[in-house]
Amino acid sequence: MKSSSRRPSACGGIERERREMPLTSDQCRQYAEAVWQVAGGGRIMSPAEWDLVRRWMVAEIPLAVVLRAIKETDSPSRSLLYYRQPVERAVERWRKALA
């Protein structure tokens, strides 16, 4: 029987097996802090916001794509959840550009 191609990551989520090494706690923290600072910060991230950032990392979305999408949003928000759709649209554009 084929073994699962997923395993827990240091961020508490699931990562793809193709990644050579699991994400470290420092990598997770640095990615989340960068996103949080660009989005305005000022309070503690909610569990839902942490989960969203973790999903972006696990999906291997480059930090630059996420930050650009947040910066280009017309109406800033204190909640990272507000940026989910702008980031998804930016990821689609990024993937099309790679194709």
Image: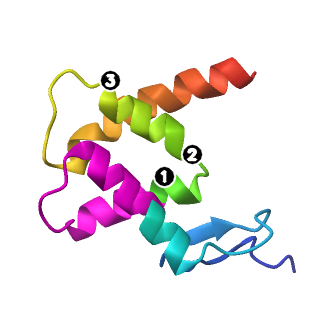
- Whichever of labels 2 and 3 marks the residue nearer the N terminus, that label is 2
**Given contact means CB atoms under 8 Å apart, are the residues at marks 2 and 3 in contact?**
no
Query: Mark 1 highlights which residue?
Result: 56
**Front position among marks 2 and 3:** 3
Quarter containing the C terminus: top right
Q: Which mark is residue 72?
A: 3
Residue at mark 3 to residue at mark 1: CA–CA distance:
18 Å
Q: Is residue 47 magenta?
A: yes
Point 21% across, 65% down: residue = 45
Q: Secondary structure at mark 1?
A: helix
In this rendering, the answer to whether 79 lies above or below 8 is above
Depth check: 67 or 1 in front? 67
At label 1, the amino acid type is: Trp
Q: Which mark is residue 61?
A: 2
Q: Secondary structure at mark 2?
A: loop
In this rendering, the answer to whether 17 lies above or below 88 is below
**Front position among marks 3 and 1:** 3
- Which range is magenta? 31-54
Point 76% across, 68% down: residue = 17
